[in-house]
Structure formats: C-alpha cells, structure tokens
Image: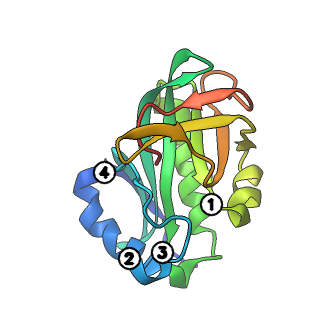
Amino acid sequence: MTSSAPVFLVKDGALSWPEVAPMRERIYPPEKLINTPMHGIEWAHAQRRVLLYVDDILCAVAGIHEREVLCNGQKLRVTGIGGVMTKPELQGQGYGKQVMLHLMTFLRNEARCAFGLLFCEDHNVGFYSKLGWLLFEGDMVVEQHGKTGPFSFRNVMVLPLNESARISGDIDLCGLPW
C-alpha cells in the first residue's frame, strides 16, 4: 500500500460516475458479463458514493442507495450498498475493507435508516461477515424490466444501523436492486 494516508470523499452518484466507470469497465467488461447470471439484470444507480483516494488516485469505491422498502409489510428506510470495487491492481491490499469501514461509520453517523443491505457473490460473504454483516435468509422481491418478482441471484446481507437488521422474513425493495 502507498504510504500516503487515504482520503475519503462522499460524492453525488451521477456526478461521480464518469470517474468510477473506467474501474467498473475493467472489473466487469461486457464480454465477461455476457455469460454470467448478472447479464440482463437491471441495477439501480447509486445516489451517492464513498470514494477512497491515495495520492489523488481513485483506489476503491462503494455506492449508497437510500430507499423506503417493505419488510414483512412494514415500511422502513434502509441504506443499500452496491458497486463496491477496488482497482484490480490494488485488490488484496485492504482498500475494499477501508472504504467499507468508512462507509459503515458514515452510515451509522449520518444515515437515518433502519439497517444496511447489500447483495454479494459467494466469494465475498466471508469478507462482509468479518465486517459485521449478517446473511439474510428470507425472501427478496425486486423490480426487473417493469415487473415485480422474486430475486435470488445473489446472497443478501444486512447490517444493523439504527435498529436490529432483519435476518429473515420478506423484503420488497420497491424498485431495482443495487
């Protein structure tokens, strides 16, 4: 890791996209996605992002999505986390952990949400578990291509923020996944 201290900035999701897009393209090129379960999934765009810089170089990023959802029929405001990425050449050096820890502190101090929620691939469950995220064992409903239905593509994990995180039951995201 570089000796300079990391700098964290929270930026508007749309305004930060031009800076983040090249990293996403390198990690998820279209030719790689075409033959995966991710192909064809509609994803929500981040409202805000936490960006981690070292020596003015973007090293890692995590998207923030705040939304009112239905948990077992009850309206709750949650914070979704999506688009967590580290530059490929910097992976394994702790930048992903740093951006997530900063994001989690930010959410605990600033967000007025019940809990955090993210989707992750199998190989990332251990990473998020070590940071305090819990597997959600219930049913997830999302919007896809104008229709609402079950979403079982990935693992769902939750993080308590201002109240206990739901680890079972039903969650309707009332929109696209993130």
For the residues carrying marks 3 and 4, which lies nearer the camera in this image? 3
Of residues 37 and 25, the one drawn nearer to the viewer in this rendering: 37
Image mark for residue 33? 3
Residue type at mark 3 is: Leu
For the residues carrying marks 2 and 3, which lies nearer the camera in this image? 3
- Residue 17 located left or right of residue 70: left
Q: Earlier in the sequence, mark 2 or mark 3?
A: 2
Residue type at mark 1 is: Lys
Residue 97 lies, in percent from the top left, at 62, 60
**Dot 3: what SS?**
helix
- Residue 158 located left or right of residue 16: right
Which corner quadrant of the image does residue 23 belong to?
A: bottom left
Q: Which residue is mark 4?
A: 13
Q: Residue at x 60, y 37 (%)?
A: 140
- Residue 21 located left or right of residue 73: left
Image mark for residue 97? 1
Q: Which residue is mark 2?
A: 25
User: Do we see residue 55 in this rendering?
Assistant: no
User: Do we see residue 9 in this rendering?
Assistant: yes
**How far apart, in angstroms, are the residues tagged by discs 2 and 3?**
10 Å
**How far apart, in angstroms, are the residues tagged by discs 3 and 1?**
25 Å
**How far apart, in angstroms, are the residues tagged by discs 4 and 2?**
17 Å
Do residues under tags 2 and 1 come within 8 Å of each other at their CB atoms? no
Do residues under tags 3 and 4 come within 8 Å of each other at their CB atoms? no
For the residues carrying marks 4 and 2, which lies nearer the camera in this image? 2
Residue 92 lies, in percent from the top left, at 65, 76
